[in-house]
């Protein structure tokens, strides 16, 4: 599913295509590209869930913590999000790329992925997708994009 999400993000989201209106057309293109139908619709549902997060107050109510609060992960989250990824989420909070509210949105989207083998690169893409989707996070998005591309080129140690 991550391959489909990354493809959709790079191909469509940057071009401001309305995924709901053109969902069937996008699904057909993905089928022609060789993706499985079940994976395609699961990825599209994941994106719809991402869009719905900014339209609800659920995460805002959950994430009203101070800057000094520490996130305690549930057993299910601990099983799904490895220590490297949890450490990176904490790092992103410390450097002000993620607010507590956006962190909760990232964790929500991570938990909706169909994999138990989440890599750090997958996490970075998910963070980028969430930041792109939340208005007012342009600076954080730019920082995350720089982190993603610098790590891809091997500049981070």
Image (tube, rainbow, N blue to C red):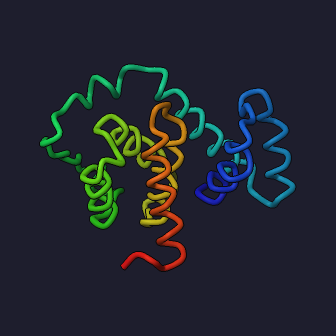
Residue 83, by quadrant, is bottom left
Residue shown at the point (22%, 48%) measured from the top left: 73
**Above or below, 110 relative to 120:** above
Indicate the quadrant containing the N terminus: top left, top right, bottom left or bottom right.
bottom right
* Residue drawn at (63%, 55%) of the image: 6
State left or right for residue 44 relative to residue 81.
right
In the rendered image, residue 34, in percent from the top left (x then y), is placed at 80, 61
x 79%, y 43%: residue: 27
Is residue 58 placed above or below 10 in the rendered structure? Answer: above
Viewed as shown, does residue 93 lie left or right of 32? left
Q: Nearer the viewer, residue 14 or 108?
A: 14
Q: Is residue 126 left or right of residue 32?
A: left
- Number of numbered discs visible in the structure rendering: 0
Q: In the figure, residue 32 lies in which quadrant?
A: bottom right
Q: Position of residue 93 (x, y in %)?
A: 28, 49
Residue at 57% in and 40% down: 46
**Quadrant assignment, res 41:** top right
Q: Residue furthest left?
A: 68
Task: Locate the C terminus and report the quarter of the image it occupies.
Answer: bottom left
Q: Please, is residue 85 above or below residue 137 in the view? A: below
Give residue 65's position: percent from left, percent from top: 18, 33
Relative vertical location of residue 22 with respect to residue 112 in this rendering, above or below: above
Looking at the picture, tell me which residue is in the foreground, 26 or 17: 17
Q: Which residue, as the protein is rendered here, is positioned at the far front? A: 139
Residue 30's x, y, as percent? 79, 51
């Amino acid at each position: 599913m991550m391959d489909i999400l990354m493809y959709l993000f790079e191909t469509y989201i940057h071009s401001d295509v309305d995924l709901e209106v053109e969902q069937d057309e996008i699904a057909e293109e993905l089928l022609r590209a060789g993706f499985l139908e079940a994976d395609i619709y699961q990825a599209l549902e994941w994106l719809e869930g991402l869009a719905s997060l900014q339209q609800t107050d659920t995460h805002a109510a959950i994430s009203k913590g101070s800057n000094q609060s520490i996130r305690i992960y549930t057993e299910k989250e601990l099983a799904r999000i490895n220590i490297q990824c949890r450490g990176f989420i904490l790092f992103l909070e410390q450097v002000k790329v993620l607010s507590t509210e956006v962190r909760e949105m990232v964790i929500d989207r991570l938990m909706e992925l169909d994999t138990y083998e989440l890599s750090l690169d997958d996490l970075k893409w998910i963070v980028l997708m969430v930041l792109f989707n939340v208005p007012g996070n342009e600076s954080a998005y730019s920082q995350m994009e720089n982190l993603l591309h610098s790590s891809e080129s091997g500049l981070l140690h």
